[in-house]
Image (cartoon, grey):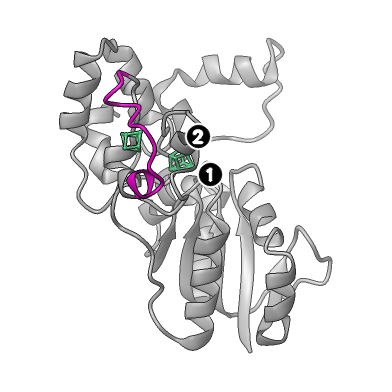
């Protein structure tokens, strides 16, 4: 039995919901999984050691720092589960704003903020991560691959090539060539080119592919008429805190 725990930090719980959306596939695996800790679905959680910990969310309070170190110490394999845990995700947009302005937007002019928040970092800012599962949320096929690999004891085979590869395999017309600011060339595949297949530009939720060149894509965005602000917004949206984007996203 593979003993797993699912943990949540600053996030919307969408990655955990995706785990549930495995539906009957999850039922097929139930006799091979001991889900020992998952606050979203159980009130009988055991704070123990785990073979695999799935961690959703970025680290954005002082208490989070203590908790993620504790989870790391109790887990053989730690998975950054989704964009927030892997690269900061949408939460990290606040890192580029004035703290007081953010509090006002979120809590109103009363500023009724009861928690102290800090710069929102991906979990690998504080602890070692064994596997990164990008996506907002991660695809069901990526989640299944990681679970199966953990049960069988091999390294999961996750794509490291760009979304453009999946997009071409789907025979989509290229949005970037047509003058739309698609992030596909620098973003890791795994979603099946979901957005371009629906006529929408890739926004980057899977984070950087293995060998991205954000400077080159930024030049292309300038060529099709994006302002510097618009380029920064696209780079900062999901993965501005990732080392491959941090320089150009100017934190
Ligand atoms: S539409 Fe986007 S993802 Fe598809 S090939 Fe063009 S740049 Fe790549
Ligand atoms: S196309 Fe881009 S934004 Fe859309 S799901 Fe895939 S990685 Fe995320």
Ranked by sequence position, the earlier of labels 1 and 2 is 2
* Residue on which the image places disc 1: 136
Residue 40 shows in this picture? yes
Proximity of marks 1 and 2: CB atoms separated by less than 8 Å = yes
Q: Whole-Å distance between the Cαs marked 1 and 2?
A: 9 Å
Magenta range is 166-179
Would residue 112 appear left or right of 101 to someone viewing this image? right
- Name the residue: 21% across, 29% down: 217
Residue 119 in sight: no
* Residue 206 drawn at (x, y percent): 42, 46
Question: Which of the two marks, 1 or 2, is nearer to us in this view?
Answer: 1
Circle 1 Cα neighbour tier, 10 Å, few/some/many (<14 / 14–19 / ≥20): many
Residue pointed to by mark 2: 90
Q: Is residue 182 above or below residue 132?
A: above
Residue 244 part of the magenta segment: no
| Label 1 CB-ligand 2 distance < 8 A | yes
Mark 2 lies on a secondary structure that is: helix
The overriding secondary structure of the stretch rendered in magenta is loop
Does the stretch in magenta take in 174?
yes
Identify the secondary structure beneath mark 1: loop
Q: Position of residue 120 (x, y in %)?
A: 46, 39
Q: Position of residue 126 (x, y in %)?
A: 40, 55
Q: Kindly indicate the quadrant of the structure image that contains residue 44.
A: bottom right
Q: Residue lying farthest front?
A: 171
Quarter of the image that includes the C terminus? top left
Looking at this view, is 163 or 113 the one in front?
163
Quadrant of the rendering where the N terminus is positioned = bottom right
User: Which residue is found at the position 46% from the left and 75% from the top?
Assistant: 77
Ligand 2 found in image quarter: top left
Residue shown at 50% from the left, 53% from the top: 65
Q: Nearer the viewer, residue 247 or 203?
A: 203
């Amino acid at each position: 039995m593979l003993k797993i725990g699912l943990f949540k930090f600053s996030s919307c719980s969408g990655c955990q919901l995706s785990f549930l959306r495995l539906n009957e596939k999850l039922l097929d695996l139930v006799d091979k999984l001991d889900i020992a800790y998952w606050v979203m679905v159980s009130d009988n959680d055991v704070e123990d050691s785990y073979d695999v910990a799935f961690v959703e969310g970025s680290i954005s309070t002082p208490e989070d720092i203590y908790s993620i170190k504790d989870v790391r110490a109790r887990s053989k394999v730690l998975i950054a589960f989704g964009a927030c845990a892997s690269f900061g995700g949408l939460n990290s947009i606040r890192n580029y704003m004035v703290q007081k302005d953010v509090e006002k937007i979120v809590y109103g002019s009363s500023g009724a903020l009861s928690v102290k928040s800090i710069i929102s970092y991906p979990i690998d800012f504080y602890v070692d991560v064994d596997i990164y599962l990008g996506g907002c949320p991660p695809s069901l096929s990526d989640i299944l691959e990681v679970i199966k690999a953990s049960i069988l004891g091999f390294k999961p085979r996750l794509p490291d090539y760009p979304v453009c590869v999946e997009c071409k395999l789907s025979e989509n017309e290229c949005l970037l060539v047509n003058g739309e600011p698609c992030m596909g060339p620098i973003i890791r595949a795994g979603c099946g080119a979901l957005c371009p297949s629906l006529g929408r530009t890739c926004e980057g939720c899977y984070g950087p592919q293995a060998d991205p060149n954000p400077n080159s894509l930024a030049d292309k965005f300038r060529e099709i008429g994006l302002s510097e602000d618009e380029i920064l917004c696209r780079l900062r949206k999901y993965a501005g805190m990732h080392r491959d984007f941090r320089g150009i996203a100017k934190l």
